[in-house]
Image (tube, grey):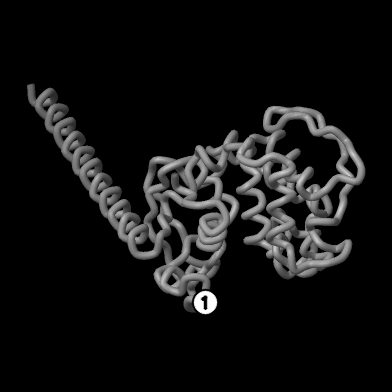
């Protein structure tokens, strides 16, 4: 009898502790989501919902001609063969795999054709790819872009202070590679620390001294952006709009949201 009573007592304690943890986590979620709502109202930026899945994965959101027209307009101040609107690229054939469809080899492809090819092969919106290259290298509006802007077009495996990984260097490799990388993240989510539908502690800056903030990631698209650029803007960065915050500010995901919204409308719809 004594043994049975002891087991029962242990089970009760375990259940109580589990309930406490559930309640504490629910409070954590509520606090994070409330702050995210406040940021949305004040800064038009929700760290847990940077862009909707619908918009992120809409590979048909722009056709080749629409992409070309868009690049022409945004790059109107650029003249010459180095401009994104007029430069051409050779694309190597790639077989379909579990991440992306096949890519046909071709020569003399426009940037618009490369973006469209990557979008359709990997199921990522061309709007996302255009926004990403602007965020990383201002490539869409550069007048004219530098060779480095093309080499590191999407910031994929290209540190700011070092050479790109040769496997990913160059405009075509960057554009198709970044679309493929997002699909890899989606297919291998367990390898990364960020989780959809959970509270995530996300750093404000590469310097860990700057700390972290809790973010409830609402959807897969936002999670993929954090895996790609694993920092959130702090209050100073958000208050600065398109400007500079403080020593603990990072701007990648803030700028993605600002650029996308200014070009294509609310990314959260």
Residue 109 position within the rendered picture, expressed as x and y whole percent measured from the top left:
86, 45
Q: Quadrant of the N terminus?
A: top left
Picture layout, residue 218 above or below residue 136 = above
Viewer-proximal residue, 98 or 56? 56
Residue at 27% from the left image edge and 46% from the top image edge: 25
Viewer-proximal residue, 120 or 199? 120
Residue at 24% from the left image edge and 43% from the top image edge: 21
Instruction: Characterize the local packing of mark 1: few (<14), some (14-19) or many (20 or more) Cα atoms within 10 angstroms.
Output: some
Picture layout, residue 38 above or below residue 121 = below
Residue 90 position within the rendered picture, expressed as x and y whole percent measured from the top left:
89, 45
Q: Secondary structure at mark 1?
A: loop
Query: Is residue 196 toward the left or the right of residue 38 in the image?
Result: right
Q: Which residue is mark 1?
A: 244
| Displayed quadrant of residue 119 | top right
Residue 121 position within the rendered picture, expressed as x and y whole percent measured from the top left:
71, 34
Q: Quadrant of the C terminus?
A: top left
Q: In the current view of this chain or complex, which residue is farthest to the right?
A: 107
Picture layout, residue 19 above or below residue 68 = above
Residue 230 position within the rendered picture, expressed as x and y whole percent measured from the top left:
54, 56
Residue at 49% from the left image edge and 71% from the top image edge: 249
């Amino acid at each position: 009898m004594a043994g049975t009573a002891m087991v029962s007592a242990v089970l009760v304690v375990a259940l109580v502790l589990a309930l406490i943890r559930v309640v504490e986590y629910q409070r954590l979620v509520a606090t994070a989501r409330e702050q995210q709502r406040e940021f949305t109202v004040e800064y038009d930026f929700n760290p847990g919902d940077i862009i909707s899945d619908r918009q992120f994965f809409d590979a048909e959101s722009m056709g080749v001609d629409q992409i070309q027209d868009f690049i022409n307009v945004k790059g109107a101040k650029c003249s010459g063969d180095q401009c994104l609107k007029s430069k051409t690229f050779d694309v190597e054939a790639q077989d379909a795999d579990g991440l992306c469809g096949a890519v046909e080899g071709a020569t003399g492809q426009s940037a618009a054709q490369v973006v469209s090819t990557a979008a359709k092969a990997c199921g990522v919106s061309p709007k996302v790819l255009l926004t990403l290259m602007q965020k990383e290298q201002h490539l869409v509006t550069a007048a004219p872009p530098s060779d480095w802007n093309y080499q590191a077009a999407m910031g994929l495996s290209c540190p700011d202070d070092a050479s790109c990984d040769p496997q990913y260097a160059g405009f075509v490799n960057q554009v198709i590679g970044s679309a493929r990388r997002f699909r890899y993240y989606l297919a291998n989510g367990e390898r990364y620390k960020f989780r959809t539908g959970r509270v995530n502690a996300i750093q404000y800056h590469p310097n860990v001294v700057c700390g972290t903030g809790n973010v409830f990631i609402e959807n897969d698209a936002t999670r993929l952006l954090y895996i790609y650029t694993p920092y959130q803007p702090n209050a100073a960065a958000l208050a600065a709009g398109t400007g500079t915050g403080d020593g603990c500010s990072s701007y990648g995901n803030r700028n993605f949201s600002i650029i996308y919204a200014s070009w294509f409308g609310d990314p959260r719809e």
